[in-house]
Image (cartoon, rainbow, N blue to C red):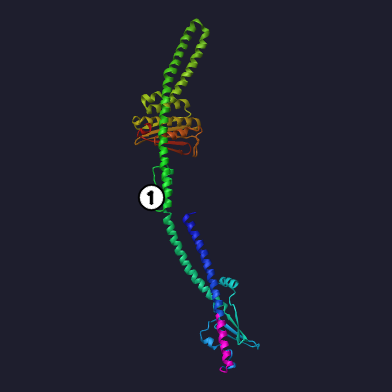
């Protein structure tokens, strides 16, 4: 859920709860004021009637006019009030009502039902009329329940309208304030996405709020440390790859100069023994043939091993010749079952040695993986050298979706390490309708700092 909407909804709920609490208190106060007003009316009328009794007992007033409510009516009596006087020594009573209840109810029926159930409007105030310790009668003041409900509704509606405007204004101000306060969150998320994509040189700017600034500082420190670790790892990878190539070059030279020459000498001796045995000892001819076959098989294995360790033409003729020899070798092995096509655009001699070796090893590893796992009938290898070296290897094998798992376990991992060590980019994609595309992009600048 959006944080702005989450906070705004919480604030709105709290505002509504406060509004309900305020409305309840306003209704209570309205009912309390209605009861208080009824008590005051009853008290005022009772004192007026007691004053009339005092005048009658003094011979100034007329007893037949008691009780006289005219003074109360002329002094601004509230509408909707009914007064009933009951004499103590007579069952007769006298009543007077000032005004009537509203003709049309302009409040909701639900509001009236709730108000009646909670507050019981129309509460009667009872007051005895006494003089000199004698009770002459009782006075009952009954207000109009409808007028009380109307007054409560008007107050509540005014309060709700004012509160609604206030809550809306507050929510708007809060939303704008939260939007401004959370604006750095978008910048931080964009920065984290850049870091995730590999741009470790990205740094977050300074923020106004301390909380955001602490987060940005922590992320910048993390990015700086990761960038340093990545650079150190790339330097180490370059050194390890160079060391591996040196070891392969040394082993290839030793195999060619020592083991290969020894096998060639053994094969020559076997041929000589066969020629001599054919004349002097025919029984040894088969053994000489067997020695020749074994030696030839070992020579083939040594040549294949030399091709994998360090092709002889790589140091003498360069990358283009090595790739052509590699593709020709795979075409010979597969005998037409899988056709390998090579296309080179650009000058391979312009490549630094590190990039040239990396491109050859990537092609070598990819072709080996294709032969083992892809079950492809056609493989295209293209190398383009312009502002950067782009090696693209595409097959029509069985791969149909990514992520593509390398069955050998370290094949694609080794390729990725070589590309990352030279600050390049590796992309894997699925060909249409099936098959795998491996694309390696390497910058042409020689990596010299990693070797120092």
Q: Farthest residue in the front direction?
A: 132
Q: Camera-side residue: 236 or 106?
A: 236
* Residue 87 appears left or right of 250: right
Q: Farthest residue in the top direction?
A: 280
The x and y percentages for residue 339 are: 45, 30
The correct choice, above or below, for 372 with respect to 400 in the image is above
Where residue 111 sits, quadrant-wise, is bottom right
Which residue sits at x=40%, y=32%? 238
The correct choice, above or below, for 366 with respect to 196 in the image is above
Q: Camera-side residue: 384 or 264?
A: 264
Residue 106 appears in the figure: no
The x and y percentages for residue 278 are: 49, 7
Residue 253 appears in the figure: yes
Where residue 36 sits, quadrant-wise, is bottom right
Q: Quick one: SS at disc 1?
A: loop
- Tell me if residue 275 is in the magenta stretch: no
For label 1, the residue is 206
The x and y percentages for residue 311 are: 41, 24
* Residue 421 appears left or right of 111: left
Residue range (magenta):
40-60
Rendered-image quadrant of the C terminus:
top left
The total number of labels drawn is 1
The x and y percentages for residue 416 are: 44, 35
Where residue 82 sits, quadrant-wise, is bottom right
Pointer 1: residues within 10 angstroms few (<14), some, or many (20+)?
few
The correct choice, above or below, for 382 with respect to 57 in the image is above
Q: Camera-side residue: 276 or 94?
A: 94
Q: Camera-side residue: 409 or 198?
A: 198
Which residue sits at x=52%, y=69%? 23
The correct choice, above or below, for 188 with respect to 126 in the image is above
State the predominant SS element of the stretch in magenta: helix
Which residue sits at x=41%, y=21%? 253
């Amino acid at each position: 859920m959006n944080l702005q909407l989450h906070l705004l909804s919480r604030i709105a709920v709290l505002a509504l709860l406060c509004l309900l609490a305020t409305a309840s208190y306003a209704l209570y106060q309205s009912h309390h004021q209605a009861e208080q007003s009824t008590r005051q009316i009853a008290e005022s009328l009772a004192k007026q009637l007691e004053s009339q009794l005092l005048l009658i007992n003094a011979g100034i007033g007329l007893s037949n006019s008691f009780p006289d409510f005219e003074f109360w009516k002329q002094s601004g009596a509230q509408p909707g009030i009914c007064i009933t006087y009951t004499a103590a020594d007579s069952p007769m009573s006298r009543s007077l009502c000032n005004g009537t209840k509203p003709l049309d109810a302009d409040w909701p029926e639900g509001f009236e039902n709730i108000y009646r159930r909670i507050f019981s409007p129309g509460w009667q105030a009872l007051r005895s009329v006494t003089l000199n310790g004698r009770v002459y009668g009782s006075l009952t003041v009954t207000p109009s329940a409808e007028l009380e409900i109307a007054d409560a509704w008007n107050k509540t509606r005014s309060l709700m309208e004012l509160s609604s405007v206030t809550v809306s204004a507050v929510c708007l101000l809060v939303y704008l304030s939260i939007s401004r306060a959370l604006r750095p969150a978008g910048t931080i998320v964009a920065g984290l996405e850049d870091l995730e994509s590999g741009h470790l040189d990205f740094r977050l700017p300074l923020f106004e709020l301390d909380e955001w600034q602490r987060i940005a500082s922590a992320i910048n420190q993390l990015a700086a440390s990761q960038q340093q670790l990545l650079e150190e790892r790339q330097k180490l990878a370059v050194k390890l790859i160079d060391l591996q190539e040196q070891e392969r070059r040394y082993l290839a030279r030793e195999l060619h100069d020592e083991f290969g020459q020894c096998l060639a000498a053994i094969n020559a001796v076997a041929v000589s023994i066969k020629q001599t045995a054919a004349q002097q000892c025919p029984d040894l001819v088969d053994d000489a043939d067997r020695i020749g076959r074994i030696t030839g098989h070992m020579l083939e294995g040594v040549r294949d091993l030399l091709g994998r360790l360090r092709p002889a033409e790589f140091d003498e003729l360069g990358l283009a010749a090595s790739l052509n020899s590699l593709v020709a070798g795979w075409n010979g092995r597969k005998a037409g079952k899988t056709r390998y096509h090579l296309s080179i655009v650009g000058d391979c001699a312009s490549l630094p040695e590190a990039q040239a070796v990396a491109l050859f090893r990537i092609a070598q590893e990819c072709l080996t993986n294709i032969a083992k796992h892809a079950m492809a009938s056609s493989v295209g290898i293209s190398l383009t050298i312009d502002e950067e070296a782009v090696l693209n290897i595409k097959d029509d094998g069985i791969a149909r979706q990514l992520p593509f798992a390398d069955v050998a376990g370290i094949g694609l991992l080794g390729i990725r390490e070589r590309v990352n060590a030279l600050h390049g980019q590796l992309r894997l994609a699925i060909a249409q309708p099936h098959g795998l595309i491996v694309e390696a992009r390497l910058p042409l600048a020689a990596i010299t700092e990693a070797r120092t």
